[in-house]
Amino acid sequence: MDPHREALQRIVSNLANKNGEIHNFIDMLNHTIKNVQVNSSNAISELDEEFDGLYSILDEMKGSMASTIQQEEARKVQALQAARQIKERVTMASAFRISLKPTVSDSMTHLMVDFALERRILQAVNFLPVPKAPEIDLAACLVADNCITVSWRMPEDDGRIDHFVLEYRKTNFGLPRVKDEQPWELIDYIKATEYTLSGLKFDTKYMNLRVQACNKAVAGEYSDPVTLETKAFVFSLDSTSSHLNLKVEDTYVEWDPTGGKGQEKVKGKENKSGGQNPLLKSNRRCSSIRSGGPSPKRTPVNTRSSVRGSRDRFTGESYTVLGDSAVESGQHYWEVRAQKDCKSYSVGVTYRNLGKFDQLGKTNSSWCIHINNWLQTTISAKHNNKTKTLDITVPDRIGVYCDFDGGQLTFYNANSKELLYTFRTKFTQPLLPGFMIWCGGLTVSTGLQVPSAVKTLQKGENVLSGSTGSLNNTA
């Protein structure tokens, strides 16, 4: 390519970058000017209030002093009148009358008003300085258990700081940007130099944070923003390939006995012997049970494309729905809560090759735990069409921990972090979260970090690996 053209292209590219930087700088200046206007208006308003208060004090003192002067004036007038009356009644010698003097003075010099103290007070009125920007201690910040603890300090001691303001926003960009960012969320009136944001859903890669110091008069500049990584496993349920008897909406799935009405009845591979699945026998009864209670509040249907591509829907007795994102490496965690009237459900993972007639745990490429509440409550681990009944209490919420690289799939009581069961194998393909539901509903919680309690339990879990050997394999 012509060297002149290359040089020209570089110049154009540099000018475009400079133009973007200038626009960002202008946006930052506009934001700063807006803050200055707001803070100056607040300062003027507070100053007016202070002067109004001083004026009211002086006005009260004026009234009190005027009343005192009037009272003293009346008293002196009465004293002078009494002296005049005495003088008129005296009929003594002329010499005595000349020596007679009244006992009071009309100069009133001892009632001079002294404003020296008030003048000194008014002269001592001073503006509070603008607080300096705090400094966030990045080394002391902590991201764990879907909570973020932020710590900061002032560049110098300032005893006039009244409170701090913390602002944060989610982002998928490693560096702060002016455009294409979500608005800041605000936590006001923080008295300490540390604050913990709790109960967050980490559905973006990062979190931007900044802190502002405020005294009783004005707010200072924001600290330099810091960026903390908050990456977690986020997925929704794939409605495009789920069974037609399942209503799927984002992270909620509900079994609907009328959903597959009108479709051609298909017998699954697992039912070739002619025996009827007990789930199908009780469809009508389950329908009457579900109609008695209100459906939970739902979010809009997920519109993301299916990771299963053009794969056919699950059908037959495979009331299954998969997640729309796969686990390919690392450690991940999500939770599942079942409705109280849910009769049967499974929670686990599977390779993408799960057939449309297959059920979780009945193939060598799927692993799950199954809860049955139909006649009696039981919980069991399933893999490769093998079942192991577990002598444990069924929890309200189930936590799923997947260590892809370590070849471990562990289920926990999400409330107590009690171990339910562990599969150990070598995963050779990406894993999709899988769920089977019959007569009830499941809610999936994603965007969760691996809890600290689970990490601690992993250190001593090797001693329990012998209890899971009967269902393990190296698929």
Image (cartoon, helix red, strand yellow):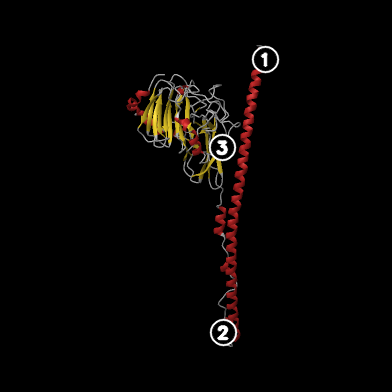
Callout 1: helix, strand or loop?
helix
Residue 20 x, y percent position in the rendering: 63, 27
Residue 96 shows which numbered tag?
Answer: 2
Please report contact status of discs 2 and 3: CB closer than 8 Å, yes or no: no
In the displayed structure image, the side of residue 358 where residue 99 appears, left or right: right
**Lower position in the chain sequence, tag 2 or tag 3:** 2
The C terminus: image quadrant:
top left
Q: How many residues crowd mark 3 within 10 Å: few (<14), some (14–19), many (20+)?
A: some
Q: Nearer the viewer, residue 410 or 224?
A: 410
Q: CA distance from mark 1 to mark 3?
A: 43 Å
Callout 3: helix, strand or loop?
loop
**Lower position in the chain sequence, tag 1 or tag 2:** 1
Residue 120 x, y percent position in the rendering: 55, 55
Residue 142 in view of the camera: no
Mark 2 or mark 3, which is nearer to you?
3
Residue under numbered circle 1: 5
Q: CA distance from mark 2 to mark 3?
A: 94 Å
Q: Nearer the viewer, residue 411 or 202?
A: 411
Residue 465 x, y percent position in the rendering: 34, 25
Residue 184 shows which numbered tag?
Answer: 3
Mark 1 or mark 2, which is nearer to you?
1
